[in-house]
């Protein structure tokens, strides 16, 4: 298991070097993206 943000460069590195790992997005970034989406909808 690897915890990262949603960066495409991290995804690519994990896929090429740790293909068997499960990628998990950290709570901070999920909360930040949710809050940004909520503000946009309002």
Image: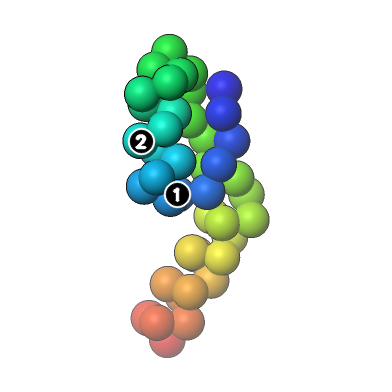
Write down the residue under mark 2. 12
Q: Mark 1 points at which residue?
A: 6
Residue 39 sits above or below residue 6 on the image = below
| Pointer 1 local density, CA inside 10 Å: few below 14, some 14–19, many at least 20 | some
Closer to the camera, 42 or 16?
16
Q: How far apart are marks 1 and 2 (CA)?
A: 11 Å
Dot 2 lies on which element?
A: helix
The reply to whether dot 1 and dot 2 touch (C-beta < 8 Å) is no
- From the viewer's perspective, is 11 left or right of 22? left
Where is residue 10 drawn, in percent x and y? 45, 41
Camera-side mark, 1 or 2: 2
Query: Which of the two residues, 18 or 3, is positioned nearer the viewer here?
Result: 18
Quadrant holding the C terminus: bottom left
The numbered dot on residue 36 is: none
First of labels 1, 2 by sequence position: 1
Residue 7 place in picture, x, y as percent = 43, 50
């Amino acid at each position: 298991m690897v915890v990262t943000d949603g960066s495409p460069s991290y995804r690519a590195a994990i896929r090429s070097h740790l293909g068997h790992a499960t990628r998990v997005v950290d709570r901070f970034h999920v909360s930040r993206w949710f809050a940004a989406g909520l503000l946009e909808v309002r």
